[in-house]
Amino acid sequence: MRLARTLATCAMLAAASTSALHAQVAQKKNPPATAARPANNAPAANASLPPLTEARPGLETRAIVKLDAATQTAMKTMPNTRITARRIEEHGTDLIYVFKMRAGNQDKELWINAATGAVVPTTKMAAPGRKGG
């Protein structure tokens, strides 16, 4: 009697584990629609981000910090703004992501170091065609 109860319990556990495993596999194959979110968790205002332009071909491949991470930093640094342009440029020996952002009717620019991910004060570097300070 005890053996029969133990076998029945084992069979129930095996059946429950198998059905749970099948459910997990099915969910991975067909994820629910609510699980689909943009990789960068961008707010609605930045749902369609502008493409990255390179000052010179191949700069993006040299960046240690990837564009998605730099974009997240830009959105956290300047909330309630909309990214209107994304560019990667060389400034001396530094590789810099330049984000053009708009808040209301004001245009702003934010620089992020592509090697460290740190926000770069624009007064420390001269942009191409501008005199540095």
Image (tube, rainbow, N blue to C red):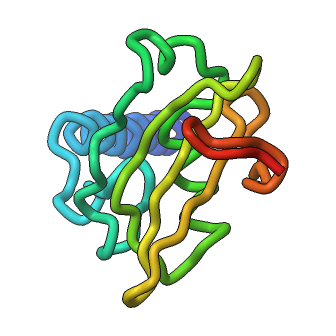
Where does residue 12 sit, x and y in percent of width and height?
38, 44
Q: Nearer the viewer, residue 45 or 103?
A: 103
Q: Is residue 58 left or right of residue 64?
A: left
Residue under the point 35% across and 33% down: 53
Q: Nearer the viewer, residue 14 or 33?
A: 33
Where does residue 57 sit, x and y in percent of width and height?
38, 12
On screen, 104 above or below 8?
below
Q: Is residue 112 left or right of residue 48?
A: right
Residue under the point 40% across and 34% down: 14
Find residue 84 and report its image quarter. Answer: bottom left
Res. 102 in view: yes
Q: Nearer the viewer, residue 125 or 102?
A: 125
On screen, 78 above or below 36?
below
Find residue 55 and report its image quarter. Answer: top left
Q: Is residue 28 left or right of residue 132?
A: left
Where does residue 19 sit, x and y in percent of width and height?
28, 42
Q: Is residue 31 left or right of residue 21?
A: left
Residue under the point 61% across and 58% down: 110
Where does residue 127 sit, x and y in percent of width and height?
62, 42
Residue under the point 28% across and 50% down: 50
Q: Nearer the viewer, residue 91 or 62?
A: 91
